Amino acid sequence: MVQGFGLSNLRYWNLWDSFLNLELIDSEQNSYWAQGILFRDLDELGIILPNSFSDDISFKSIIIRSNLLLNELEFSIEGTFFAKDKFLAFIPLDELKISNNQISHKKRVYTKDQLSNLKYCMKRDFLNYPGTIIGRSVYSFLDKNQNTPIVDNRLYFLNPIQPSFTEKEFEYVSLPDIRLYHGSPCITLTEVKSNFGDRTIQQYSITGIISADHHKISENTGVYIPVKAILDFINRFI
C-alpha cells in the first residue's frame, strides 16, 4: 500500500486512494492519459482534475485504473458536460450512483462488489488545518498502464509565504518531473489540538491539486491550486 508519511490514517480508507489513473478516449478513438481524484457530492460521483482539455475535443469514454481494482473500469461520458474553470475540470460519472455509502451502476454493467473498491473524497476532505505541518505528499501513476502510484515528498513552494492558507488562485511550485504529477492531490498531514485542547491529533487533508500545464515558467515548475480555489470550483459547478 502506498503510504504518504508512514502513519495510519483515521479514515476508513486512505485519502490518497481517491487518486485514480485515467485514460480518456475521444470520438476518433484517440487516447489521452490523465490523473484525477474521485469526488462524491451527495449521491453523485465524478472526477476532479486540472483543466487541460480543448473545447474542440469530444470524449466518448473514460477508463479508470487503480491498485484497489481487480480490473479496469470503463464508463461512457459521450455527451457529458464537463464543468470547467480556468484551472480545474469536473467529469461526472453519470452511470454511477451512491446510496448508503454503496456505489452501484445504474444499468448494472458492473456489480456492487466490482465497484466497492472505488474510494472517493468529499468536500470535507479539502481543508486547511491551522496546525503544525508534518509533511506533504504528491502522487503519480507515471503512465496510463500503471495501477499503483508512486509517492514524492519533494514539493517546493517558490513563494516563501505559507501556501496552505493562501487566498491566491495558485502558487508556483517546483518538483522534479512535475508533468508526471499533473492532477495529483497534495495530501498534507498536520498535527492539531483536539477540540478539548487536552491532546494533539494527526489529520490528513487535501490542501491542493498539482497542475503542470498552467503558468509554466520552467521545466520542473507548475502550479499548486489551493483549497480556496478548489472549494470555489466545487461550490460553483458541482
Image (tube, helix red, strand yellow):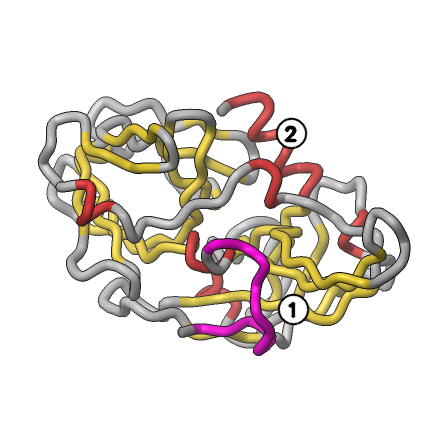
Q: Is residue 5 magenta?
A: yes
Secondary structure found at label 1:
strand
At 19% from the left edge and 32% from the top edge, which residue is drawn?
Answer: 105
The answer to whether mark 2 and mark 1 are in CB contact below 8 A is no
Tell me the tag on residue 215. Answer: none
Magenta-tinted stretch: 2-12
Instruction: Identify the disc placed on residue 174.
Output: 1
Q: Residue furthest right?
A: 197
**Which residue does the image show at 56% across and 29% down from the upper left?**
234
Amino acid type shown at disc 2: Asp
Q: Visible in this render: residue 214?
A: yes
Q: Position of residue 161 (x, y in %)?
A: 87, 58
Question: Which residue is denoted by mark 2 in the rendering?
Answer: 232
Residue at 29% in and 28% down: 97
Percent x, y of residue 24: 25, 46
Q: Does residue 92 lie above or below 33 as drawn?
A: above
